[in-house]
Amino acid sequence: MQKLKQKIKLLQKIIEKIKKIDKKIVFHLVNQFNQTLNLTTILKTIQIKRSTYYYWLKMKNKLKEKEEKYLLQQKRIKALCLNYQYFYGHRKITDLYQKTFNEFITKKKVYTIMKKNDISCRLRIKKNFTYRNLKNNLQIIPNLINQE
């Protein structure tokens, strides 16, 4: 019992030193003292409500799912760009992505993924039509209508 009280005092001292409580620190402390102390006592010493702790846990799992989905989207976009030899831009790749994987994704998201991974479409060099050759070889045609 004395050891538990000492641990609680240590936790309180640590919390007093740390003014802003970070989620990572809270999860670390809960994992560290979970075998010896009850969850409610740990959270009371850290001065965090139990509902916020469970909310943080829920959000932590959702963030992991979002990151996994984002990584999957990155891989798919890279594969599409490789298949079409980097000729398509972000607009065409969004259409291809939606058709092939039956999953909605915005053009802006595809654009940001392509920008972060340095994937850009190869631009065709547009040839400008010049009139230099025509100016030299112009033929003057006589006025057949004779309007003036």
Image: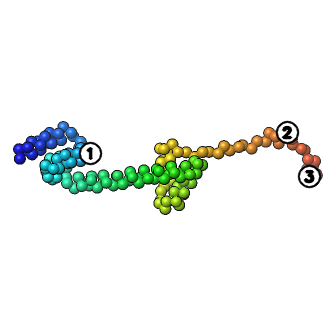
Residue indicated by mark 2: 136
Give how far apart the Cα atoms at labels 2 and 1 are.
Answer: 77 Å
Q: Quadrant location of residue 122?
A: top right
- Residue 48, horizontal then vertical, whole percent: 19, 49
Residue 147 badge: 3
* Label 2: how many Cα within 10 Å (few below 14, some 14–19, many 20+): few
**Image location of residue 67, percent across then percent down:** 38, 51
* N-term mark: 1 or 3: 1
Q: Amino acid at mark 2?
A: Asn
Indicate the amino acid at tag 3.
Answer: Gln
Asked whether residue 26 appears in the rendered view, the answer is no
Between 8 and 34, the one lying in front of the other is 34
Question: Local crowd at mark 3 within 10 Å, few (<14), some, or many (≥20)?
Answer: few
Mark 1 and 3 residues: CB-CB less than 8 Å, in contact? no
Query: Percent position (x, y) of residue 5?
Result: 8, 44
Task: Using residue 103 as the reference point, say whether residue 135 is left or right of it.
Answer: right
Q: What residue does disc 1 label?
A: 24
Residue found at the very far left of the displayed protein: 2
Q: Earlier in the sequence, mark 2 or mark 1?
A: 1
Camera-side mark, 3 or 2: 2
- The Cα atoms of the two marked residues, 1 and 3, are separated by 90 Å
Q: Is residue 134 above or below residue 146?
A: above
Taking the spot 48% from the left edge, 44% from the top edge, the residue there is 117
What residue is rendered at 13% in x and 49% in y? 36
Q: Secondary structure at mark 1?
A: helix
Left or right: 97 as drawn, with respect to 141:
left
